[in-house]
Image: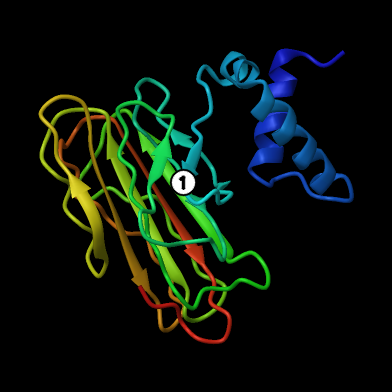
Amino acid sequence: ANTPDYDKVRLQKVLDGKIKGEIYDLERETILKKYSEQPKLIKKLFGKEPTVVTDSKGNTWTALTDYQEASSNSAVRMYYCSNPTVGSGHTFTTTSTFSGLCVVAVSGARTATSPFDQQNGSTGGTSSNPQGPGSILPSVNGCLVVTGFYQATTGSAPVLPSGYTSVGTWPTATAFLGGVAYVIQTTATATNPGWGPGNVGATYATNIASFMPPAVAPTT
């Protein structure tokens, strides 16, 4: 029989897309269904229940890697939805507490296949200035590149990475601070955006992901 440690490692590799092959899609689908129906099992394996993002239009959101600093609640995760239903009164909800939720809406993104391209992220018990998620190199020209930053601590709003446009930043006097920013790359270039932490030295989590266009670059 498999041990809990084996299950934990196997599950994380499958969910992160690190296990490939003929059984990958079926195994990933099976595990996602099993564990989405039994969130307490994920809490048992990883020490926390998974965050779920929903919206008022009934769209399905695909989660990317959860980057969480081990000793605190500093964590970041991106979700994406290709060709969603949109309209007036569109609202979004997360099951996470003490969280910041930013939504980026773009036109001209890839819809025939998944737009997701690359991702990276980093966490740590002590943040420096600047603090980056790690580099990615988008696969094609015209990609939308999104980065997020979060600290489970008090402090000022983080300073945006150079060359990126703000989606939103938030300071707090009680629990957390963070921000989300983006850039549309005309030419695919390696990027590792350096955030200026709102509380230098405190725990942090930051991530980055790229999303591909069809034939033309997306617009916000």
Q: Is residue 61 left or right of residue 203?
A: right
x%, y% of residue 2? 82, 16
x%, y% of residue 184? 38, 75
Q: Residues within 10 Å of mark 1 (few under 14, many from 20)?
A: some
Q: Quadrant of the C terminus?
A: bottom left
Figure quadrant of residue 175 = top left
**Vertical comparison of 93 with 168: above or below:** above
| Residue occupying the point 52% across, 61% down | 85
x%, y% of residue 207? 41, 49
| Residue occupying the point 44% across, 83% down | 187
Secondary element under disc 1, as helix, strand or loop, is strand
**Vertical comparison of 218 with 18: above or below:** below
Residue marked by disc 1: 55
Display colour scheme: rainbow
Query: Furthest residue to the bottom?
Result: 215
Figure quadrant of residue 113 = bottom right
For badge 1, the amino acid type reads Asp
x%, y% of residue 8? 67, 23
**Vertical comparison of 105 with 72: above or below:** below
Q: Nearer the viewer, residue 68 or 218?
A: 218
| Residue occupying the point 56% across, 66% down | 83
Q: Nearer the viewer, residue 83 or 76?
A: 83
| Residue occupying the point 39% across, 60% down | 146
